[in-house]
Each structure stands twice: as C-alpha cells, then as structure tokens.
C-alpha cells in the first residue's frame, strides 16, 4: 500500500488548520448566527401583529382581526397558528392555515394586548422550531466549514505543488549524481541538523521497504533502530555523535527492524557536512548491511564456545593423562622419566644457588622371596604400603620415585647430608615398624648429598647407589652414608657374614642421562621418523620389562631401545625419506650404518651390558662368536628385538599405523623360534594387552553407551581427542619425550 505524497499531506494539514480557525471563531461568537437573527426577526413580527390586533380590538372588529392574521400566516409559513384570548384565558379567536399542523412541535410566542377597557388580553403565535444543531453547529455552519475546508485544501494543494518543486532537496542534486548514489550497494542518508532525512538512496529505501521520496522529511529516529548489545544503553547513535562532535564516526553497528519484522544489522559510518562558515549543517551516513556476516560470526562464536568447552575437557583430560604419564601405576609415585626431569632441575638449582640436595636410594630387602613365597599380588601390596610409608615420612616439597622393581628414590631439595641421614633413618624405622602384610618388611638405604663432590646428577645417583650397595652388603635393614662407607675389605668381610646379593657391573661405567638425551635429540631433528620409531620401541620395552627385567638392566634396555638406530642419521636423504620399499642394496647400506652406530655407542658408553644388548640385538638369531653374554643381557636383547619387530608390523615407514595390535601379535607368534623368545613374547603380548585395556577403560566410553547421548559433532571431537591423547596414554618412555613433529620414514 503506497502512502500519500508529502504535498497532499501538507495540504490536508493546512486545511485542517482552517477548520480549527473556524471552530475557534464560532466559540468566540465571531461567526454570523442565523438562529439568533431568526429569533430577533420573529420578535419584531410578533410586535407588528400585536399592534394590528390592538387596533382591531379598539374597534371590536373580530372579523378584521381574523382576516389580518390569515394574511400574515400566508406570507410567513413558519407561523403554524395564532390565537387571541381574554383576561380569563379563554380563547376568543384561533387561526390555523392548515388542519394538519395541530400535532407538530412548535415554539410559542405570547404578546400582551391590554389596552384600556378592552377584554382581549393576549396574542399567542406558534412558530416552527429553530434549528439549534450540536454544540451550536447548525447545518448551515457545517456547510460553510466544509466549503471553506475543501476550497482551502484544493488551493493549498495547488499552491504547494507549484512551490515545493522549487524547494525539493533531491532536485538540488544532478540526476547523474543521484543515479550514481543509487548504484551503491550500501544505503546512504543525508540528514539535516534536526536529524531529518534530506536524501535517501534506493538501497536504503529498499531495506526499509519505502520509497525514497516518502522518507524525505522524516526524522531518522522514527525508524525502529536498535543499539548494538555491546554498547551501553545511554550511548548515542553514530550520526548524532557526528553532528554533536563534528567528527567522523566509523565502524559502529546498529540494527533495524524492517517492514517484514526482520532484523538487519548495519555497519554505520557518519561524517559531518561542514559549511563554508565552519558550522556543521548535517550528516552524511552510510549503512553497510552486514547481517549475513553477523550471522556467520554468531555461528562462529557458538563454534568457538563449543571448542572452548572441548578445550577445557581436553585440558582436564590432559592433566589426568599427564598425572598418569608421570606416575607409577602401582604406587602412584613418580616414574623414572618424570623423576629424572625433576631431579636434574633440582641438581642444576643446587649448583647454581649453592644449596644442598640430598638423594636417598631405598631397596626393599628380600623382595624376591616375598614374591616367590607369597605371590605377586602380595608383593604389589607390599610395594604400595612401602610407598605410603615413604610419603608419610617426607615433606611435600620432596620428590618420591619408584626407581625400578623394589627400589625407590627420594630427592630432598635444600637438605644437607646430616638432614638426609636423619630422614633415611626415620624412613627405615617407619618401614620396620609398619608391620606390612605381617611379613616383617625391612629396607636398606643409601644416602648422599650434592656437597660431597658429585658434579652431575648421574654421579649423585651413582653415589647413592654405592651407599645402598654398601648397606645391603653389610647386613641390610640399615642406612649407609656415602661419605661414611666401609672400606672395600670391610665390605668383603661383611659380605661373607650375610646372604649374597645380586650385583651387576652396570654402574661401573656410567651411562649419563644427558648424553642419551643429546643423542636422541640429534636423531629426532635429523630423522624424526627414526626417532619416533625408537621412542615407541622404548615405550614397549618399558611396559614389557616391568615385571621381567628390573633395576639397572631395565634402565639400560630403555637406553638401547632409544639409540639402537642412531647410526641411520648418516643415511642419504634419498634413503632416509624414501616412502616405498627399498632395494637390497639400500637395505645393505642401512645395515652398514647400523653397525657404525653401534661402534659410536661403544666408544661413547664404556658399558659392557649396554654394548652387549645392542650387539645381541644386531646379531639377531645368530650367536656372537667368541663373546660370552650374560643371561640378563640376552633376555633384554630379545625383548628389544620383539618390540622393534612389533612396531615394524604396526607402523608404516611414513609413521602411519596400518595394522592392529592383534594382527601383529598373531604374526609375532608365527615368527617366534626359541623357547626363551616364546616366553618373552607371551609376556610382551600380555603386558601390552593389559596396558591397552586399562587405557580404553579409563578414558574412552563406547559409542553405544546409552547413558551418553552424545551427538555426532561431539564424537568427532572425541575422535580427534582420542588420537591426541592416545599418544600420551602409551607406555611411558622415561628418557626421551621430544616435541612432536611430522614424522618421516625411518
């Protein structure tokens, strides 16, 4: 429906003003009153008739009187009847021109006729009622007002059409400029100082559903604007600020409800129109429709909110997984990897700030007998209770680690040897009096401190291990300080008086932790795919050897797994980063570089057990000629071979997984040869299967869980999260955890 033009509306308004003027004149009785004139004329007529009646009464000529009254009534039809009555009120004469007027309503006028001794007393005339109208507006007045209003309206409309065409602001702009403004995609408004629309282009008119000429003259605040929710309620619109401050306003957002009640959002830029005198005479405002962008932004904000929620869930699960990755699953103590990181940090701090650091190494006495006589379940419970006793005997700032098997390590920051010795004795007494499982469990402890000459964290651990060795050789269930150990001859004498203990030559030649880390980091940056393979193999070895190879041999097995392919960092890029299968010549070249890597490790680490593990692993099923390898070294080499083969069966050269664990287990069973390998393979499979079952049970609910009700999007996020967290939930390598990077072939 199109609205009336502005000219027509102005003409109607002016005509209405004319009506108001006439009504006011009527109220103040400035208009001619025909009703009052009629009443006055009737009064004069009655006086004239009364005089004629008085003359007739003086002659007592009743016939003449009747004739005169009839003549008057014929000339004045508004007189309905006339009568003359005597002094007693009795009618003497009554004249009616028609017989049908007796029932009509009439206005009565009485005139006295008393004169001398005449018996006629009063003349009574009946007139038709005078039209009074509503509030005094008779039909004649209404006709007059209607005539004046119509005539004025037509005159005003004609005059305004003639005059306003010279005052139309749109005619000031040339048609070419107006056409150019109409081609703009965004809406444009020109406002005067009263915030009235002087000019609107077609884009803005289409947005609000009106014609450009209909918008002219309207105040812009009459449109249903809404402020941006981010702005305060009392803030002004940008065009108001531009007019008040005389400065350009950009990047403001407002909303407008259109003719279909659809809410559209605009980005508004408003610039003041400055006249030659420097005053601000108006505003030029542009309205860029950004509704779709705002809708997309709203969707993005919703997605970001979901991502934030997912990120928070991931963060919490990462914290849980970080706790699991740094804790021993049986005793909840720090595992070796986490402890080495913390211990190295404390040792560096003690050297930098010249503060002491005490290290206590503890070994549960005769633990092998506990397992053999009471079973592994009781042995596990003993280790749990020992860990609880240790936690209750140290400070919150101290670090407790399950070092391996039945060994525990305690780091006491800012504690000297005297304080550490006191804590060690307290721990030994607490374990002895705890009555763990009713078995009379005891422990031997070795104590040392950083101020006793250790220049590396590994050397400090070595000192604590030597002190622990002395404590066990001198009878167990005691504490031995490294700076107060018995002489070697005394140790031999004490050893003859007590049960023999299992010893190895591992720590006679130190395998520094920082050297292993440096070699692995170099391998990671040169050949990330090879490093990833070695890290996974080390993870598998840690998991598989937890109940098979313990103590120092387990540590060396982990080192061997991390570095068993270190020689491949020298391979050419054409082989190192080759995705397809390799030729026999390439495989021979890889084998030669592996041998070079073993030679490098043999030169770096003068540790016979470590070199024996790597040599046995490299020899495969063949025997080492002229070399006698200890049984525990051979067992560790077999575990390394199984872990390496298992990773090769489950991961491709480009680092992508392509075979399930179950399929790899079946292939390993087919390849198993010796009885020892079959036994170790079975333990390897059981350890990895148990680890995988615990991981799935602790973290991931099944998709068909009826209590979940998760959406497809949530499962998509969970699947991505599963891929990330599955890396953290794998068996933990204690020596290397480099920053993840894209894997390449090994």
Image (tube, rainbow, N blue to C red):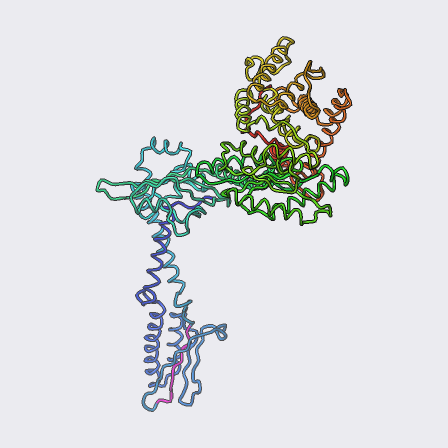
Pick the front one: 180 or 604: 604
In this view, 49 is above or below 732: below
Position above or below: 396 against 622: below
Residue placed most toward the observer, 445 or 44: 445
Percent position (x, y) of residue 509? 58, 25
Q: Is residue 88 left or right of residue 465?
A: left
**Which residue is found at the position 34% from the left and 61% from the top?**
22
Left or right for 242, reference 710 = left
Location of the C terminus by quadrant is top right
The single residue placed furthest to the bottom in the displayed view is 117
Magenta segment includes 125: yes
- In the image, the segment drawn in magenta is 118-127
Task: Report x, y in % for residue 347.
Answer: 50, 36
Residue furthest to the left: 277
Measuring from the top left, give residue 126's x and y in whole percent: 42, 76
Residue 106 falls in image quadrant = bottom left
The answer to whether residue 186 is above or below residue 97 is: above
Instruction: Note whether residue 7 is visible.
Output: no
Q: From this viewpoint, which residue is outermost toward the top?
A: 585
In the figure, is residue 675 to the left or right of 320? right
| Residue 198 in the image: above or below residue 36 | above
Residue 568, quarter of picture: top right
Q: Residue at x 69, y 37 (%)?
A: 498
Is residue 73 shown left or right of residue 673?
left
Residue 468, visible in the rendered structure: yes
416 falls in the magenta region:
no
Residue sitting nearer the eye, 247 or 618? 618
- Spot occupied by residue 200 in the image (x, y as percentages of width and height): 38, 40
Task: Report the predominant secondary structure element of the magenta stretch.
Answer: strand
């Amino acid at each position: 429906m199109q609205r009336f033009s502005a000219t027509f509306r102005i003409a109607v308004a002016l005509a209405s003003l004319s009506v108001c003027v006439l009504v006011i004149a009527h109220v103040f009785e400035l208009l001619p009153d025909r009703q009052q004139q009629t009443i006055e004329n009737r009064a004069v007529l009655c006086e004239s008739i009364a005089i004629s009646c008085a003359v007739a009464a003086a002659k007592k000529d009743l016939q003449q009187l009747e004739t005169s009254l009839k003549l008057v009534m014929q000339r004045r039809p508004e007189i309905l009847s006339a009568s003359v009555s005597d002094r007693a009120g009795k009618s003497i004469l009554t004249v009616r021109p028609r017989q049908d007027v007796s029932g009509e309503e009439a206005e009565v006028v009485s005139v006295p006729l008393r004169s001398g001794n005449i018996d006629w007393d009063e003349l009574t005339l009946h007139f038709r009622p005078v039209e009074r109208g509503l509030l005094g507006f008779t039909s004649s007045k209404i006709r007059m007002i209607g005539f004046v209003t119509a005539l004025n309206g037509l005159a005003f409309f004609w005059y305004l059409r003639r005059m306003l065409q010279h005052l139309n602001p749109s005619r000031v702009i040339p048609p070419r400029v107006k056409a150019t403004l109409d081609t703009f995609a965004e809406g444009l408004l020109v406002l005067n100082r009263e915030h009235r629309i002087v000019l609107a282009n077609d884009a803005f008119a289409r947005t609000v559903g009106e014609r450009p000429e209909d918008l002219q003259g309207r105040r812009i605040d009459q449109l249903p604007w809404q402020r941006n929710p981010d702005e305060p309620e009392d803030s002004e619109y940008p065009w108001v600020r531009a007019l008040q401050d005389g400065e350009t306003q950009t990047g403001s957002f407002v909303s407008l409800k259109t003719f279909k009640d659809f809410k559209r959002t605009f980005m508004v830029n408003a610039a003041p129109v400055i006249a030659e005198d420097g005053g601000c005479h108006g505003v030029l405002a542009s309205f860029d429709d950004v509704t779709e962008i705002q809708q997309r932004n709203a969707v993005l904000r919703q997605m970001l909110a979901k991502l934030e929620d997912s990120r928070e869930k991931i963060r919490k699960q990462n914290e849980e997984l970080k706790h699991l990755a740094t804790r021993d699953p049986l005793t909840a103590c720090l595992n070796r990897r986490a402890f080495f990181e913390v211990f190295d940090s404390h040792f560096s701090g003690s050297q930098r700030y010249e503060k002491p650091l005490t290290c206590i190494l503890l070994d549960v006495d005769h633990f092998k007998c506990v397992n053999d006589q009471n079973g592994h379940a009781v042995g596990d419970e003993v280790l749990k209770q020992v860990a609880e006793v240790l936690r209750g005997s140290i400070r919150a700032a101290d670090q407790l680690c399950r070092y391996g098997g039945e060994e525990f390590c305690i780091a006491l920051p800012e504690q000297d040897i005297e304080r550490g010795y006191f804590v060690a004795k307290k721990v030994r007494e607490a374990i002895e009096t705890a009555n763990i499982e009713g078995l009379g469990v005891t422990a031997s402890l070795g104590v040392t401190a950083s101020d006793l000459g250790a220049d590396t964290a590994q050397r400090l651990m070595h000192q604590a291990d030597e002190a622990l060795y002395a404590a066990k050789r001198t009878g167990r269930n005691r504490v031995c300080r490294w700076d107060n150990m018995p002489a070697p001859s005394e140790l031999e004498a004490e050893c003859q008086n007590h049960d023999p203990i299992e010893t190895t030559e591992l720590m006679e030649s130190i395998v520094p932790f920082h050297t292993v880390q440096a070699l692995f980091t170099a391998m990671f940056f040169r050949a990330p795919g090879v490093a990833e393979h070695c890290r996974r193999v080390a993870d598998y070895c840690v998991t598989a050897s937890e109940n098979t190879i313990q103590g120092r041999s387990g540590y060396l097995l982990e080192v061997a797994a991390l570095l068993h392919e270190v020689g491949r960092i020298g391979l050419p890029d054409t082989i190192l980063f080759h995705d397809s299968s390799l030729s026999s010549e390439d495989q021979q070249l890889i084998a030669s570089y592996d041998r070079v890597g073993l030679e490098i490790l043999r030169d770096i680490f003068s540790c016979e057990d470590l070199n024996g593990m790597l040599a046995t692993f490299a020899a495969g099923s063949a025997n080492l000629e002229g070399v006698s390898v200890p049984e525990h070294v051979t067992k560790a080499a077999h575990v390394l071979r199984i872990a390496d083969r298992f990773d090769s069966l489950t991961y491709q050269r480009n680092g992508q997984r392509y075979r399930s664990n179950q399929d790899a287990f079946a292939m390993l069973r087919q390849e198993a040869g010796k009885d020892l390998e079959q036994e170790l393979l079975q333990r390897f499979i059981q350890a990895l299967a148990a680890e995988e079952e615990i991981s799935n049970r602790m973290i991931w609910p099944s998709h068909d869980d009826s209590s979940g009700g998760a959406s497809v999007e949530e499962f998509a996020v969970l699947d991505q999260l599963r891929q990330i967290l599955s890396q953290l939930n794998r068996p933990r390598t204690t020596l290397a955890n480099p920053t993840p990077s894209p894997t390449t072939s090994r």
